[in-house]
Image: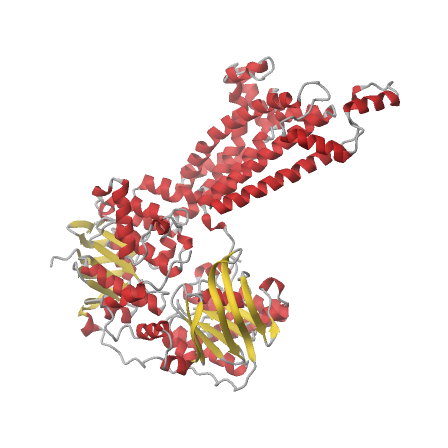
Amino acid sequence: MLRYALRRSGWTVVQLAVLSVLVFLLTDLLPGDAATVGFNEQADLDQVARLREQMGLDRPLATRFADWAHGLLTGDLGTSLVGGGPVGDVLAHSVAATAALAAVTILLLVPLAVAVGLVTGLRAGSRTDRVVSAVTLTLTSVPDFVLALLLVALFSLRLGWLPSTWVGADDLWWQRPELFVLPVVVLLARTVCVLSRQIRAGTITSLGAGYTVQARRLGVPPVRLVLRHLLPNAAVPGVQELARTGDQLLGGVLVVEAVFAIPGTATALVDAVQNRDVPTVQALTLTLAAVACLLNLAADLVSRRLAPRTEVLR
Amino acid sequence: MEPVIEVRGLTARAGTAVLLDDVDLAVAPGEVTALVGPSGSGKTTVALALLGESAPGVRLTGTVGVAGTAVVSADGPTPLAPAVRGRVVAYMPQHPAHALNPARRIGSVLTELARLHRPEAHRRQAAAEYAAGALRTAGMPDGPATLRRFPHQFSGGQRQRVALAQVLVCGPRAVVLDEPSTGLDTVARLRLAGELARLAAQGIAVLLLSHDHDLVRAVAARTILLDRGRVTDMGGTAALLPVRPPAALPAPATGPSPSSGGRNALEAHGLSAWLRPGRRGEVLHDVTVRVPEAGCTGVVGPSGSGKTVLARCLAGLHERHDGRLALFGEPLPVLRHRTPRQIRAVQYVWQEVRNSFDERRTVLDQVARTAVRLRGLSPQEAVRRARQVWERLGLSSEQAARHAGALSGGELQRAALARALLAEPDVLICDEITTALDAVSTRLVTEEIARLRGESRTAVLWIGHDLRLVEQLADDLVVLDRGGVVDSGDRRAVLASPRSETTRLLLRSRDLGSAAVTGPSTPHGVQGKEQPQS
């Protein structure tokens, strides 16, 4: 297990290194740069060239990459070409909101999905299962923005119970839990459904498996049977699904951020691309990619522990 | 002595069918009682009734008393039944490998069961001691390294003993074992006999469900004969199951003796194999095996000796190996790099074949597909040929139309053989392909093998645990132990003058039923042999 963990982590480091190169090259391919955006149409080419020189954009690609990579390793992400402040600040600002949203969602998602999956899986085919499955399947197929708008129309506009937007909350959003309710519900709606289907399928499989039957015959009481003997096996497909969900959540769900005007990563990324703010785009992309890599690393390690047989025999 | 299990007038009905009809039996502590009958006679139904359990749709009536607790009454299972499970009666199912939880370390499950059933095992330390004790009684090493392993890290025979340890750690007063010798090689069977005798000596009531008369004769003091749900006879084992003369097997299906000086169809030279990358976990060491054209080489050895790894190397499935493989003198690469001709030429049939069939298509289709893919026959022609082989192996056309999920293990084993035969291979590798077969089907299979050697000059590598069967089939014999060849050469010569202890042990365990083997010294002598694979 330890050997596997080390090897798998080693690969993640390699992945991250390759990713940083890719991110740099791809952003370099973006048409135009900050120098052209900064001026209006009357600016002559000399002025643009001078500005480019100032910004260091005229140096060869390799030099700029070395510079950037050195900055990354020392924690300096560069200066935003648009706002003028350090990129780190932009990042901290946008990632915080998204991370908080994602964390709350995942904290609620796991117990909810496990509970729904177990209840439906243990009574597969019963009335409860049919009703819950119908609801989950329907919710899976409702697009996020439709659900978001419906909820806003009902709870914000008609009933006036919950705020419909984060506009005006500024930096104090973390003090106002009511802001989270609607976005989290929208984010949960689909993820709980997808994840609980996985757990349901896993539960049905391991309910009929020999080890569950034998544990029951050896006198293991029902609750313990489900939690200690069945769930570790039923959860395996769910863990990978959870990592994928985490990815999506941290990538900033653009639709949700747009509807509720949340100053999160997706919003920041779109803004940065529009402004050709290359350092910000690079930093945001790399951060999100790194988080995705780490989540998948965690998921692989957890599934390996849960289902140690995954090693392929050659 | 007061019996631990008392069954009176037990009847089981499924709809109008009567599965058990007025069964009476008793199992006393401190001895092994055998319940003997052909498959389908209701042995497992009886066993589950002792736990107050029945298959869906089966209704139980009668009385079943376990250590004074009524688990089945005239109205079926009583609410007291769950309390006796594990603690008073523990059941070990037929395929114990499936009974181990793949996601849990064995130590964790063992201590959990100890804490559940032994009031004095509340402390972690005490529970761990019970777990270690149960492993020891089941004939396993009991160190912390063993307890920290997952079930897949044990060999098949070891998994069976882990399952037995799970049963024993509950501290039951009665143990029910359902066909424990299925799929065990002769040495493991001998060891099992010793374990059962030791359990009985500890004062546990042991009920052994089996159709393996040799095993029953070796361990059971009393025997109950069950046929189609009725008890037909009961009494002392010696009286009910007299020892047959050992040569009572079907006529040997000897093929043509190999043409002397015939070419070697398949050859492995200095073969070593590892389980893990970087040459770690060696499971085969410098093994040399030859199968001449139209010849048959038998490979025998205790469980965990590397028989299956050898077969997988030859079939090209096990890539972590080193050494020279040759097919008619030409080098034979791993499966991924084999040409279609080489793939057709070397066919492999293994023991647990269910997963190799698509459950949603009919079996005959899948069997015929080999001939379409590897020999380029038209689908109609392939199906026609498939039917011929199918019938020679004793399978009906009704079974041919069924899906894989609806066939029994024995039927699928024969279907897998048919699938390989349709490739018209030059070399056929058979790895324990008769484990789920009864005597009649086994004879059909051996006849087919003999026919192949005679008509198609196919070379056969036969891996088997039944030494008597191997003796009938093989000309040459290779004895494996701990990944190395310990004896090899002409079959008669090897068996007449065995050079290794392993061969002598195999010979001794071949005659399990007819010789007294239950003395504690024999199993202990075996104990150190099968080291856990690390």
Viewed as shown, does residue B358 lie left or right of B127? Answer: right
Q: Quadrant of residue B179?
A: bottom left
Q: Is residue A64 above or below residue A81?
A: below
Number of labels in the image equals: 0
| Residue at the farthest top position | A168
Residue B473, position in %: x, y? 43, 79
Residue B165, position in %: x, y? 30, 54
Q: What sort of colour scheme is used for the picture?
A: secondary structure
In this view of the protein, can residue A209 be seen by the observer? Answer: yes
Instruction: Between residue A196 and residue B219, name the one nearer to us.
Output: B219
Q: Is residue B426 above or below residue B277?
A: below
* Residue at (68, 18) in percent of width and height: A85
In this view of the protein, can residue B377 be seen by the observer? Answer: no
* Residue at (49, 42) in percent of width and height: A301
Q: Is residue A223 above or below residue A154?
A: below
Residue B387, position in %: x, y? 52, 72
| Residue at the farthest bottom position | B260
* Residue at (86, 19) in percent of width and height: A43
Residue B144, position in %: x, y? 34, 49
Viewed as shown, does residue B141 lie left or right of A258? Answer: left
* Residue at (49, 65) in percent of width and height: B401
Viewed as shown, does residue B483 lie left or right of B4? Answer: right
Instruction: Between residue A227 and residue B168, name the one nearer to us.
Output: B168
